[in-house]
Amino acid sequence: MGFVVLILFLLLTFYEIKVLYSGGTYFKSPFDKEQLFLFDGPETFWVILYCTGIVALSANFGLDLMAIRLLVLEVLCLVAALKVGNSVMSTPMRIYALFLFWLIIGCFYSPAPFYGVRVFLKYTYPILIALAASAIVRNIEVGMKALLWARKIAVVSIVFFFVPGLNIIGGAVFWYATALAITYQFMCILSVALFFFTDEKRKNMIYAILFCIPCILWVFRTSIMGTALALMIFSFFKYKLKSLPVIFGVLILFIVAIFTIPAVKNKMFIDKSGKDVTALQEGKISFDDINSNGRFAMWEWSLDHFFVGKELTGSGTGNMQETFYAGRHPFIVKICHNDYVQMLCDNGLIGLVLFASSFLGIIFHCFIVFSRTKYGPPIKIFAVAAGASLGGMLLSMYTDNAINYTMATFSYPLGAYGMMLGLIRAQKVDY
């Protein structure tokens, strides 16, 4: 299977390079199936790149193919952005660039600079894909085609993971279930946005529900929480303060799900007896009752060893990851399941503040764009899909290392954000 995956990787990479320098490809319009549009080379490249972010192509023959694929995609994004030119660099993205510069500095005082480079590359992909999108996407048809094709590939991944016999292939071609579940947050929010801003109500509502099901069946608490928060943020984007009852309703549904879905309840609490909504109301449930699978102890150990005494700078980019990969810790896992803890341990409060400022700035920027009447429904779809899903992914980073799956997780909201910037630039209005 590994050899087949390697061939797929080479074919996909060759095809992406080929279309980037091609004369273009005809696509059916996402709005009128009878109408054809000629996408130029970079536009065709963008559609293929964006919709295949969920494709991991992992191989087990001593070669970290996913890391190689990430590096190749970063180079292609940079080449495409430079080839087209006129990329849009918003203020939050400038702050993110400072964060990346701080990661580079962290490599110089890190005991594990090689791992520091690996961490740096993972954090670099979101801004590179946003820059490529902002340079390439200048019309709605290209952006919508990329979104819709990305959703189609995500549906295919669900089929491969849930149809008996296909999961072996799915595990090699697509990302792990944990990464997919986080990625489905974006697909869910995209479908909800299309429900509100297009005429295909029934189809998009089915899609929205479909992308909520895997994280429930897999009992991934991280993704359940992330999806719930993303839906809350979407409601706030759409209805402002009037959304508070909706947000409260989603929160209630989330709490009810914890206590009424047996699989979720069994995974949530150490001792399930007496754990119900009444106990929560009476204050009889605390953090000590939550089954963290050793996360709390792992985070405390990590902070004590890498953060305490080095609060501002941390211990160096990649230091904590190298320690966990090498097994020099009292736990049985290779990742700490918390990107914020890793950020604090590696790059200190400076790194965390820069990262949080940039990503929260992107969410706020998306909210401002969504709220302005001068932008039409297409741009609003990109804005709310990027902003709301990014909020859910930021929550996911608290109990998982979502940045490890950056090619699937953060590429979709940041790609949508970049497309939003490109479309606004095309309208020649202030952003």
Image (cartoon, rainbow, N blue to C red):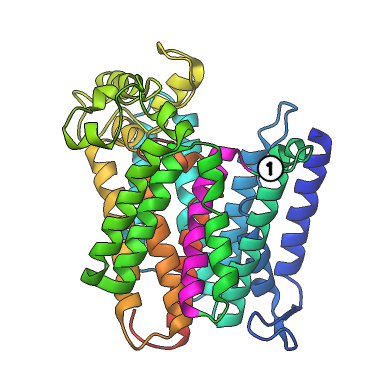
Where does the image place residue 414, in percent across and percent down from the top left?
Answer: 46, 60
User: Image quadrant for the C terminus?
Assistant: bottom left
Which one is nearer the viewer's eye here, 372 or 85?
A: 372
Magenta-span inclusion, residue 268: no
Q: Is residue 271 left or right of residue 197?
A: left
The crowding category of the residue bearing disc 1, from other C-alpha atoms within 10 Å (few below 14, some 14 to 19, many at least 20), is few
| Magenta-tinted stretch | 175-197
Where does the image place residue 315, in percent across and percent down from the top left?
Answer: 31, 27
- Quadrant housing residue 67: top right
Q: Which residue is mark 1?
A: 162
Q: Is residue 159 left or right of residue 54?
A: right
Q: Residue at x 25, y 27 (%)?
A: 287
- Identify whether 394 is placed above or below 167: below
Q: Secondary structure at mark 1?
A: helix
- Identify whether 122 is placed above or below 87: above
The kind of residue on which mark 1 rests is Phe
Q: Residue at x 73, y 89 (%)?
A: 35
Q: Residue at x 51, y 42 (%)?
A: 216
- Quadrant housing residue 161: top right
Q: Is residue 231 left or right of residue 151?
A: left
Q: Is residue 427 visible?
A: yes
Q: Is residue 134 visible?
A: no
Where does the image place residue 330, in percent across and percent down from the top left?
Answer: 40, 10
